[in-house]
Image (tube, rainbow, N blue to C red):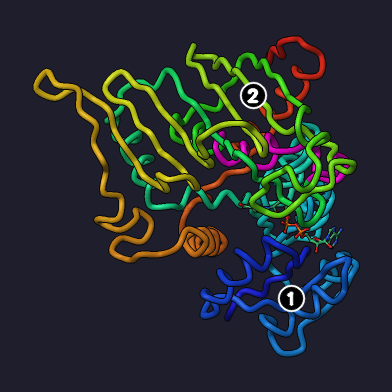
Protein backbone atom coordinates (compact mmCIF):
# COMPACT_ATOMS: atom_id res chain seq x y z
CA UNK A 1 0.00 0.00 0.00
CA UNK A 2 1.30 3.43 -0.93
CA UNK A 3 1.33 6.24 1.63
CA UNK A 4 -1.33 8.84 0.94
CA UNK A 5 -0.01 12.38 1.08
CA UNK A 6 -1.75 15.77 1.24
CA UNK A 7 0.02 19.06 0.43
CA UNK A 8 -0.86 22.42 2.00
CA UNK A 9 0.76 25.15 -0.11
CA UNK A 10 1.42 24.56 -3.82
CA UNK A 11 3.85 27.41 -4.53
CA UNK A 12 7.61 27.67 -5.04
CA UNK A 13 9.02 25.02 -2.72
CA UNK A 14 6.24 22.57 -3.52
CA UNK A 15 7.07 22.77 -7.23
CA UNK A 16 10.85 23.05 -6.89
CA UNK A 17 11.42 20.35 -4.28
CA UNK A 18 8.60 18.26 -2.89
CA UNK A 19 6.45 17.51 -5.93
CA UNK A 20 9.42 16.26 -7.99
CA UNK A 21 10.79 14.32 -4.97
CA UNK A 22 7.41 12.69 -4.30
CA UNK A 23 7.09 11.87 -7.99
CA UNK A 24 10.49 10.17 -7.89
CA UNK A 25 9.22 8.17 -4.88
CA UNK A 26 5.96 7.21 -6.59
CA UNK A 27 6.54 3.54 -5.80
CA UNK A 28 6.01 4.47 -2.12
CA UNK A 29 3.60 7.43 -2.14
CA UNK A 30 0.67 8.98 -3.95
CA UNK A 31 -0.52 12.56 -3.54
CA UNK A 32 -4.25 12.51 -2.94
CA UNK A 33 -4.95 16.11 -1.84
CA UNK A 34 -3.75 19.60 -2.81
CA UNK A 35 -4.63 22.74 -0.87
CA UNK A 36 -3.74 26.34 -1.69
CA UNK A 37 -5.42 29.67 -1.02
CA UNK A 38 -4.93 30.29 -4.75
CA UNK A 39 -7.10 27.54 -6.28
CA UNK A 40 -5.33 27.55 -9.68
CA UNK A 41 -2.08 26.55 -7.97
CA UNK A 42 -3.68 23.55 -6.27
CA UNK A 43 -5.46 22.58 -9.52
CA UNK A 44 -2.25 22.79 -11.56
CA UNK A 45 -0.29 20.69 -9.06
CA UNK A 46 -3.11 18.12 -8.92
CA UNK A 47 -3.16 17.89 -12.73
CA UNK A 48 0.61 17.40 -12.92
CA UNK A 49 1.26 15.24 -9.86
CA UNK A 50 -2.03 14.04 -8.35
CA UNK A 51 -3.53 10.58 -8.01
CA UNK A 52 -6.76 10.15 -10.02
CA UNK A 53 -9.64 11.95 -8.25
CA UNK A 54 -7.32 13.88 -5.93
CA UNK A 55 -8.95 16.45 -3.67
CA UNK A 56 -8.36 20.11 -4.59
CA UNK A 57 -9.28 22.67 -1.92
CA UNK A 58 -8.52 26.11 -0.48
CA UNK A 59 -9.32 25.30 3.16
CA UNK A 60 -6.76 23.04 4.81
CA UNK A 61 -9.44 21.68 7.18
CA UNK A 62 -11.04 19.86 4.24
CA UNK A 63 -7.73 18.12 3.60
CA UNK A 64 -7.16 17.21 7.25
CA UNK A 65 -10.69 15.76 7.47
CA UNK A 66 -9.75 13.01 5.00
CA UNK A 67 -8.99 9.93 7.14
CA UNK A 68 -7.04 8.16 4.39
CA UNK A 69 -4.36 10.88 4.37
CA UNK A 70 -1.44 9.69 6.48
CA UNK A 71 1.19 12.35 5.72
CA UNK A 72 0.77 16.12 5.42
CA UNK A 73 3.31 18.53 3.93
CA UNK A 74 3.14 22.12 5.22
CA UNK A 75 4.63 24.31 2.46
CA UNK A 76 3.25 27.75 3.25
CA UNK A 77 4.82 31.03 4.48
CA UNK A 78 6.65 30.83 7.83
CA UNK A 79 4.08 32.39 10.15
CA UNK A 80 1.45 29.77 9.21
CA UNK A 81 3.72 26.76 9.93
CA UNK A 82 2.61 26.50 13.57
CA UNK A 83 -1.15 26.63 13.03
CA UNK A 84 -1.11 24.18 10.13
CA UNK A 85 1.38 21.70 11.61
CA UNK A 86 -0.37 21.62 14.99
CA UNK A 87 -3.75 21.08 13.32
CA UNK A 88 -2.32 18.28 11.16
CA UNK A 89 -0.68 16.53 14.12
CA UNK A 90 -3.91 16.84 16.11
CA UNK A 91 -5.73 15.28 13.15
CA UNK A 92 -3.40 12.27 13.48
CA UNK A 93 -1.14 12.95 10.49
CA UNK A 94 2.64 12.71 10.17
CA UNK A 95 3.95 16.18 9.22
CA UNK A 96 6.81 17.40 7.08
CA UNK A 97 6.92 21.17 7.54
CA UNK A 98 9.17 23.41 5.49
CA UNK A 99 11.94 25.36 7.16
CA UNK A 100 12.09 27.31 9.39
CA UNK A 101 10.14 25.29 11.94
CA UNK A 102 8.31 28.44 13.05
CA UNK A 103 8.58 32.22 13.07
CA UNK A 104 8.97 32.41 16.87
CA UNK A 105 10.16 30.29 19.78
CA UNK A 106 6.63 30.31 21.23
CA UNK A 107 5.20 28.85 18.01
CA UNK A 108 7.98 26.27 17.75
CA UNK A 109 7.23 25.23 21.35
CA UNK A 110 3.54 24.71 20.44
CA UNK A 111 4.61 22.50 17.53
CA UNK A 112 6.94 20.49 19.75
CA UNK A 113 4.18 19.99 22.34
CA UNK A 114 1.69 18.90 19.67
CA UNK A 115 4.29 16.49 18.28
CA UNK A 116 4.94 14.92 21.68
CA UNK A 117 1.20 14.55 22.38
CA UNK A 118 0.33 13.18 18.95
CA UNK A 119 2.50 10.08 18.77
CA UNK A 120 3.01 11.03 15.09
CA UNK A 121 6.19 12.23 13.39
CA UNK A 122 7.22 15.81 12.69
CA UNK A 123 10.23 16.81 10.62
CA UNK A 124 11.49 20.04 9.05
CA UNK A 125 12.65 20.52 5.43
CA UNK A 126 16.39 20.97 5.97
CA UNK A 127 17.45 19.28 2.72
CA UNK A 128 21.00 20.69 2.95
CA UNK A 129 21.79 17.97 5.47
CA UNK A 130 21.43 15.45 2.65
CA UNK A 131 23.97 16.93 0.23
CA UNK A 132 26.95 14.58 -0.28
CA UNK A 133 29.37 17.20 1.12
CA UNK A 134 27.25 17.68 4.27
CA UNK A 135 26.90 13.94 4.82
CA UNK A 136 30.66 13.50 4.40
CA UNK A 137 31.37 16.23 6.95
CA UNK A 138 28.84 14.81 9.41
CA UNK A 139 30.62 11.47 9.24
CA UNK A 140 34.03 13.10 9.77
CA UNK A 141 32.63 14.89 12.85
CA UNK A 142 31.03 11.72 14.21
CA UNK A 143 34.28 9.82 13.84
CA UNK A 144 36.17 12.49 15.76
CA UNK A 145 38.41 13.53 12.84
CA UNK A 146 38.06 17.22 13.77
CA UNK A 147 38.60 16.63 17.48
CA UNK A 148 36.71 18.99 19.77
CA UNK A 149 34.92 21.68 17.74
CA UNK A 150 35.13 24.85 19.80
CA UNK A 151 34.46 27.54 17.17
CA UNK A 152 32.21 27.62 14.09
CA UNK A 153 30.82 30.04 11.51
CA UNK A 154 27.37 29.50 10.01
CA UNK A 155 27.30 31.39 6.70
CA UNK A 156 24.23 32.47 4.73
CA UNK A 157 25.60 35.29 2.61
CA UNK A 158 24.07 36.52 -0.61
CA UNK A 159 25.35 39.67 -2.33
CA UNK A 160 22.06 40.48 -4.06
CA UNK A 161 19.62 37.61 -3.55
CA UNK A 162 16.24 38.94 -2.45
CA UNK A 163 13.46 36.42 -3.20
CA UNK A 164 10.90 38.42 -5.15
CA UNK A 165 8.03 35.90 -5.39
CA UNK A 166 5.55 35.15 -2.60
CA UNK A 167 5.70 37.09 0.67
CA UNK A 168 9.40 36.92 1.60
CA UNK A 169 9.72 40.65 2.34
CA UNK A 170 6.46 40.74 4.36
CA UNK A 171 7.40 40.72 8.05
CA UNK A 172 3.98 39.70 9.28
CA UNK A 173 3.83 36.58 7.09
CA UNK A 174 7.49 35.51 7.20
CA UNK A 175 8.68 36.81 10.58
CA UNK A 176 11.89 38.30 9.14
CA UNK A 177 14.32 38.36 6.22
CA UNK A 178 17.56 36.49 5.47
CA UNK A 179 18.18 35.46 9.07
CA UNK A 180 15.00 33.42 9.37
CA UNK A 181 14.99 32.47 5.68
CA UNK A 182 18.52 31.25 4.94
CA UNK A 183 20.57 31.38 8.16
CA UNK A 184 18.14 28.73 9.37
CA UNK A 185 19.86 26.25 6.99
CA UNK A 186 23.46 27.12 7.90
CA UNK A 187 22.74 27.17 11.63
CA UNK A 188 20.90 23.84 11.39
CA UNK A 189 23.93 22.33 9.64
CA UNK A 190 26.41 23.79 12.14
CA UNK A 191 24.54 22.57 15.25
CA UNK A 192 24.14 19.14 13.63
CA UNK A 193 27.85 18.86 12.81
CA UNK A 194 28.80 19.96 16.34
CA UNK A 195 26.01 17.83 17.81
CA UNK A 196 25.54 20.65 20.28
CA UNK A 197 22.05 21.99 21.04
CA UNK A 198 22.79 23.87 24.26
CA UNK A 199 23.07 27.63 23.64
CA UNK A 200 23.90 29.83 26.65
CA UNK A 201 23.82 33.41 25.33
CA UNK A 202 22.97 35.20 22.09
CA UNK A 203 23.88 38.69 20.85
CA UNK A 204 22.79 40.02 17.48
CA UNK A 205 22.51 42.97 15.10
CA UNK A 206 20.21 43.48 12.13
CA UNK A 207 20.58 46.07 9.35
CA UNK A 208 17.88 47.81 7.34
CA UNK A 209 20.12 49.94 5.14
CA UNK A 210 19.59 48.83 1.55
CA UNK A 211 16.32 46.93 1.09
CA UNK A 212 14.23 49.99 1.83
CA UNK A 213 16.33 52.48 -0.13
CA UNK A 214 17.70 50.87 -3.32
CA UNK A 215 15.28 51.53 -6.20
CA UNK A 216 14.62 49.14 -9.12
CA UNK A 217 17.25 49.84 -11.77
CA UNK A 218 20.04 50.08 -9.20
CA UNK A 219 19.45 46.90 -7.22
CA UNK A 220 21.32 44.31 -9.31
CA UNK A 221 19.18 41.57 -7.78
CA UNK A 222 19.67 38.04 -9.11
CA UNK A 223 15.94 37.32 -8.72
CA UNK A 224 14.56 40.48 -10.34
CA UNK A 225 13.67 43.86 -8.84
CA UNK A 226 12.02 44.17 -5.43
CA UNK A 227 9.70 46.93 -4.25
CA UNK A 228 11.59 48.98 -1.60
CA UNK A 229 8.30 50.34 -0.24
CA UNK A 230 7.23 46.78 0.62
CA UNK A 231 10.59 45.67 2.00
CA UNK A 232 9.79 45.26 5.70
CA UNK A 233 12.55 42.90 6.81
CA UNK A 234 16.29 43.21 7.47
CA UNK A 235 18.77 43.11 4.58
CA UNK A 236 21.41 41.46 6.76
CA UNK A 237 21.71 40.13 10.31
CA UNK A 238 24.57 38.76 12.37
CA UNK A 239 24.72 36.75 15.59
CA UNK A 240 27.23 35.68 18.21
CA UNK A 241 26.23 32.58 20.16
CA UNK A 242 28.05 31.12 23.14
CA UNK A 243 27.24 27.53 23.97
CA UNK A 244 27.01 26.03 27.46
CA UNK A 245 30.20 24.01 26.92
CA UNK A 246 32.12 27.22 26.13
CA UNK A 247 32.20 26.85 22.34
CA UNK A 248 31.28 29.75 20.07
CA UNK A 249 29.21 30.04 16.88
CA UNK A 250 29.03 33.14 14.73
CA UNK A 251 26.16 33.52 12.27
CA UNK A 252 26.05 35.80 9.26
CA UNK A 253 23.15 36.25 6.88
CA UNK A 254 22.30 38.61 4.05
CA UNK A 255 20.12 38.98 1.01
CA UNK A 256 21.78 42.29 0.20
CA UNK A 257 25.36 42.98 1.22
CA UNK A 258 28.28 44.64 -0.51
CA UNK A 259 30.41 41.55 -0.29
CA UNK A 260 32.49 39.95 -3.05
CA UNK A 261 31.57 36.45 -1.89
CA UNK A 262 28.42 34.31 -1.80
CA UNK A 263 28.29 31.49 0.73
CA UNK A 264 24.95 29.88 1.63
CA UNK A 265 24.05 26.80 3.66
CA UNK A 266 27.74 26.86 4.51
CA UNK A 267 29.53 25.98 7.72
CA UNK A 268 33.13 26.42 8.82
CA UNK A 269 34.22 24.33 11.79
CA UNK A 270 37.39 24.69 13.83
CA UNK A 271 38.43 21.71 15.96
CA UNK A 272 41.43 20.65 18.02
CA UNK A 273 42.55 18.08 15.39
CA UNK A 274 41.40 19.69 12.12
CA UNK A 275 39.23 22.40 10.61
CA UNK A 276 36.58 22.00 7.91
CA UNK A 277 35.16 24.39 5.34
CA UNK A 278 31.85 23.37 3.86
CA UNK A 279 31.64 26.03 1.16
CA UNK A 280 27.90 25.57 0.66
CA UNK A 281 25.63 26.54 -2.17
CA UNK A 282 26.32 29.41 -4.58
CA UNK A 283 29.43 31.32 -5.47
CA UNK A 284 32.49 30.11 -7.32
CA UNK A 285 33.23 27.26 -4.95
CA UNK A 286 29.93 25.37 -4.97
CA UNK A 287 29.43 22.45 -2.56
CA UNK A 288 33.09 21.79 -1.81
CA UNK A 289 34.49 20.37 1.41
CA UNK A 290 38.02 21.25 2.52
CA UNK A 291 39.88 20.13 5.62
CA UNK A 292 42.75 21.96 7.23
CA UNK A 293 45.29 20.16 9.37
CA UNK A 294 49.01 19.48 9.79
CA UNK A 295 50.78 16.44 8.32
CA UNK A 296 54.50 15.79 8.67
CA UNK A 297 54.86 19.22 10.23
CA UNK A 298 53.29 20.85 7.14
CA UNK A 299 50.04 22.77 6.99
CA UNK A 300 47.79 21.00 4.52
CA UNK A 301 44.47 21.77 2.91
CA UNK A 302 42.62 18.66 1.78
CA UNK A 303 40.01 18.76 -0.97
CA UNK A 304 37.64 15.98 0.11
CA UNK A 305 36.15 13.88 -2.68
CA UNK A 306 32.60 13.79 -1.36
CA UNK A 307 31.19 11.98 -4.40
CA UNK A 308 33.28 8.86 -3.88
CA UNK A 309 31.65 6.12 -1.83
CA UNK A 310 28.09 7.40 -2.20
CA UNK A 311 26.20 8.80 0.75
CA UNK A 312 25.78 7.19 4.10
CA UNK A 313 22.06 6.68 3.91
CA UNK A 314 22.09 5.01 0.51
CA UNK A 315 25.58 3.67 -0.14
CA UNK A 316 26.57 3.33 -3.75
CA UNK A 317 23.65 5.33 -5.10
CA UNK A 318 23.98 8.91 -6.24
CA UNK A 319 20.85 10.78 -5.25
CA UNK A 320 19.86 14.41 -5.18
CA UNK A 321 19.49 15.94 -1.68
CA UNK A 322 15.72 16.37 -2.11
CA UNK A 323 15.33 12.68 -2.97
CA UNK A 324 17.45 11.55 -0.02
CA UNK A 325 15.38 13.82 2.24
CA UNK A 326 12.18 12.24 0.93
CA UNK A 327 13.45 8.64 1.17
CA UNK A 328 14.79 9.10 4.71
CA UNK A 329 11.48 10.71 5.77
CA UNK A 330 9.42 7.85 4.33
CA UNK A 331 11.71 5.35 6.04
CA UNK A 332 11.00 7.09 9.36
CA UNK A 333 7.25 7.00 8.69
CA UNK A 334 7.60 3.26 8.06
CA UNK A 335 9.54 2.82 11.32
CA UNK A 336 12.68 1.71 9.48
CA UNK A 337 14.95 4.44 10.86
CA UNK A 338 14.94 7.36 13.26
CA UNK A 339 14.09 10.83 12.04
CA UNK A 340 17.23 12.54 10.78
CA UNK A 341 15.89 16.10 11.21
CA UNK A 342 14.42 15.96 14.69
CA UNK A 343 11.91 18.62 15.80
CA UNK A 344 13.86 19.16 19.04
CA UNK A 345 16.89 20.18 16.93
CA UNK A 346 14.86 22.51 14.68
CA UNK A 347 13.38 24.05 17.83
CA UNK A 348 16.86 25.13 18.98
CA UNK A 349 17.55 26.68 15.57
CA UNK A 350 14.37 28.75 15.86
CA UNK A 351 15.17 29.67 19.47
CA UNK A 352 18.63 31.03 18.53
CA UNK A 353 17.39 32.96 15.48
CA UNK A 354 14.51 34.43 17.47
CA UNK A 355 17.00 35.52 20.15
CA UNK A 356 19.18 37.26 17.52
CA UNK A 357 16.14 39.30 16.42
CA UNK A 358 15.35 40.07 20.06
CA UNK A 359 18.90 41.13 20.83
CA UNK A 360 19.05 43.28 17.67
CA UNK A 361 15.88 45.06 18.75
CA UNK A 362 16.75 45.62 22.40
CA UNK A 363 20.51 46.05 22.07
CA UNK A 364 20.94 43.51 24.87
CA UNK A 365 22.30 40.01 25.17
CA UNK A 366 19.75 37.19 25.52
CA UNK A 367 20.68 34.73 28.26
CA UNK A 368 19.06 31.27 28.31
CA UNK A 369 18.42 29.39 31.56
N1 LIG B 1 13.95 24.25 1.98
C1 LIG B 1 14.26 25.32 1.27
O1 LIG B 1 15.40 25.50 0.86
C2 LIG B 1 13.19 26.33 0.96
C3 LIG B 1 13.28 27.14 -0.18
C4 LIG B 1 12.25 28.05 -0.44
C5 LIG B 1 11.19 28.16 0.45
N2 LIG B 1 11.14 27.38 1.58
C6 LIG B 1 10.05 27.53 2.56
O2 LIG B 1 8.82 27.10 2.01
C7 LIG B 1 7.76 27.90 2.51
C8 LIG B 1 6.97 28.43 1.33
O3 LIG B 1 7.82 29.17 0.48
P1 LIG B 1 7.53 29.26 -1.09
O4 LIG B 1 8.76 29.77 -1.72
O5 LIG B 1 6.96 27.99 -1.58
O6 LIG B 1 6.41 30.41 -1.09
P2 LIG B 1 5.29 30.64 -2.18
O7 LIG B 1 4.68 31.95 -1.86
O8 LIG B 1 5.83 30.40 -3.54
O9 LIG B 1 4.24 29.46 -1.89
C9 LIG B 1 3.46 29.38 -0.72
C10 LIG B 1 2.05 28.95 -1.11
O10 LIG B 1 1.30 28.74 0.07
C11 LIG B 1 -0.04 29.19 -0.16
N3 LIG B 1 -0.65 29.43 1.15
C12 LIG B 1 -0.37 30.41 2.03
N4 LIG B 1 -1.10 30.26 3.16
C13 LIG B 1 -1.88 29.16 2.97
C14 LIG B 1 -2.86 28.48 3.76
N5 LIG B 1 -3.19 28.91 4.98
N6 LIG B 1 -3.47 27.39 3.23
C15 LIG B 1 -3.14 26.93 2.00
N7 LIG B 1 -2.21 27.54 1.20
C16 LIG B 1 -1.59 28.63 1.69
C17 LIG B 1 0.14 30.44 -1.01
O11 LIG B 1 -1.01 30.78 -1.71
C18 LIG B 1 1.29 30.01 -1.93
O12 LIG B 1 0.85 29.42 -3.12
C19 LIG B 1 8.40 28.99 3.37
O13 LIG B 1 8.28 28.64 4.72
C20 LIG B 1 9.86 28.98 2.96
O14 LIG B 1 10.74 29.33 4.02
C21 LIG B 1 12.10 26.46 1.82
Which element type, helix, strand or loop, lies under badge 2?
strand
Q: Earlier in the sequence, mark 2 or mark 1?
A: 1
Residue shown at 40% from the left, 27% from the top: 269
Magenta segment boundaries in residue numbering = 169-187
Q: Is residue 160 above or below residue 365?
A: below
Disc 1 residue crowd, few under 14, some 14–19, many 20+, Cα 10 Å: few
- 238 to the left or right of 288: right
Quadrant location, the N terminus:
bottom right
- 31 to the left or right of 306: right
Residue shown at 66% from the left, 56% from the top: 96
Q: In this orientation, does residue 134 appear?
A: no
Rendered-image quarter of ligand 1: bottom right
Residue 164 x, y percent position in the rendering: 75, 53
- 368 to the left or right of 286: right
Quarter-of-image position of residue 294: top left
Residue shown at 46% from the left, 31% from the top: 195
* Residue occupied by mark 2: 238
Residue 124 x, y percent position in the rendering: 63, 49
**Residue nearest the viewer, comparing 257 with 243:** 257
Q: In this orientation, does residue 242 appear?
A: yes
Amino acid sequence: MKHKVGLIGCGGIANQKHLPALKNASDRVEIVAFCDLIPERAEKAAREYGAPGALVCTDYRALLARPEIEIVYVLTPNVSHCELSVAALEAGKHVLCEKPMAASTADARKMLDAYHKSGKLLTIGYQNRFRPDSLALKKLCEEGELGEIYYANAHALRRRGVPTWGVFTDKEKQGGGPLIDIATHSLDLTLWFMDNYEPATVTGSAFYKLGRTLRPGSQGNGMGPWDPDKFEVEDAAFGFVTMKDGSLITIDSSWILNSTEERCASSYLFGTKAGAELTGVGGANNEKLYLNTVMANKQVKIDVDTAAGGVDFFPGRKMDAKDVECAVWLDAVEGKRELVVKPEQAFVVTKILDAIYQSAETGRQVVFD
